[in-house]
Image: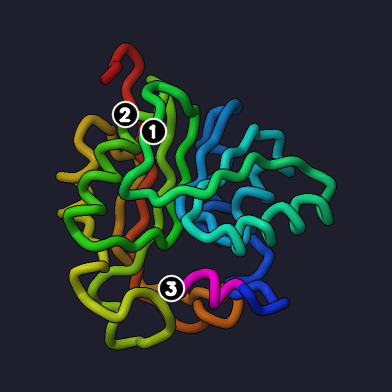
């Protein structure tokens, strides 16, 4: 599905970064940042433009090829790796930031991934996450077609144990991100820090 979606010349979700990430970038410490389910690279390229050393992971080689193309156009460098997130072995204590924007997986796979994202953060590192909530189904402006792949704040607080939540809210906002995310959206937003002195 994703190779097919990203095969068009246009960027499916645009070339500008996610608004929440854009507004919260100062929360992310300098250093290495991991972007999961990064697709065509809009968030990774934005982070690279701000001096971060970015690794972008996605299951679609087609999407990552466009990510590298966008990086070249913007005169920055990103590291792209094509992996299935449900099988990838994340290095522990490796990144000062992890960015997860609209990374929707089935519940059990999502729980395993979120545990790994906590582990891959360095102590003092920051997770930036935005996802659609189940309420998004009534807006039909993007996101997963089934409720169980959406996320709630209460579930995320369980799945991201080990992090301290700095910003955590569910809200309705206008999402304008390319062809597939445009219009009123029901989202959950997280900024969470791995406490210094902690290690998995």
Quadrant including the C terminus: top left
Question: In this picture, which residue range is highlighted in magenta?
Answer: 1-6
Tell us which disc is closer to us: 3 or 2: 2
Where in the figure is residue 49, as x and y percent of width and height?
A: 74, 43
Where in the figure is residue 24, as x and y percent of width and height?
A: 52, 47
Specify which label sits upstream in the sequence, 1 or 2: 1
The residue identified by callout 3 is 173
Q: Which mark is residue 119?
A: 2
Is 116 left, or right, of 159 in this rendering? right
Residue 102, compared with residue 122, is above or below; it is below
Q: Quadrant of residue 116?
A: top left
Where in the figure is residue 96, as x and y percent of width and height?
A: 49, 28
Number of numbered discs overlaid on the protein picture:
3
Local crowd size for mark 2, using a 10 Å CA cut-off: few (<14), some (14–19), many (≥20): many
Of residue 174 and residue 81, the one placed in the foreground of this image is 81
Tell us which disc is closer to us: 1 or 2: 1
Of residue 172 and residue 84, the one placed in the foreground of this image is 84
Residue furthest top as drawn: 197
Q: Which mark is residue 179?
A: none
Dominant SS in magenta: helix
Residue 55, compared with residue 1, is above or below; it is above
Of residue 40 and residue 139, the one placed in the foreground of this image is 40
Residue at left offset 49%, top offset 70%: 2
Residue at left offset 41%, top offset 62%: 102
Tell whether position 139 is magenta. no
The residue identified by callout 1 is 90
Tell whether position 2 is magenta. yes
Tell us which disc is closer to us: 1 or 3: 1
Local crowd size for mark 1, using a 10 Å CA cut-off: few (<14), some (14–19), many (≥20): some
Specify which label sits upstream in the sequence, 1 or 3: 1
């Amino acid at each position: 599905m994703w190779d097919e979606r990203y095969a068009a010349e246009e960027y499916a979700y645009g070339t500008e970064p996610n608004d929440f990430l854009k507004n919260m970038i100062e929360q992310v410490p300098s250093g290495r940042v991991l972007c999961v389910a990064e697709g065509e690279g809009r968030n990774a390229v934005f982070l690279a433009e701000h001096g971060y050393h970015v690794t972008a992971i996605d299951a679609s080689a087609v999407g990552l090829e466009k990510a590298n193309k966008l990086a070249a156009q913007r005169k920055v460098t990103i590291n792209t790796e094509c992996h299935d997130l449900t099988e990838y072995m994340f290095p522990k204590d490796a990144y000062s930031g992890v960015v997860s924007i609209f990374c929707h997986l089935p519940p059990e796979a999502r729980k395993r991934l979120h545990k790994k994202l906590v582990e891959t953060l360095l102590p003092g590192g920051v997770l930036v996450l935005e996802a659609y909530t189940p309420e998004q189904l009534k807006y039909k402006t993007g996101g997963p077609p089934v409720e169980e792949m959406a996320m709630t704040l209460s579930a995320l607080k369980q799945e991201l144990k080990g992090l301290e939540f700095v910003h955590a809210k569910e809200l309705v906002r206008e999402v304008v991100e390319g062809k597939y995310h445009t219009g009123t959206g029901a989202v959950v937003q997280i900024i969470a820090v791995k406490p210094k002195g902690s290690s998995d």
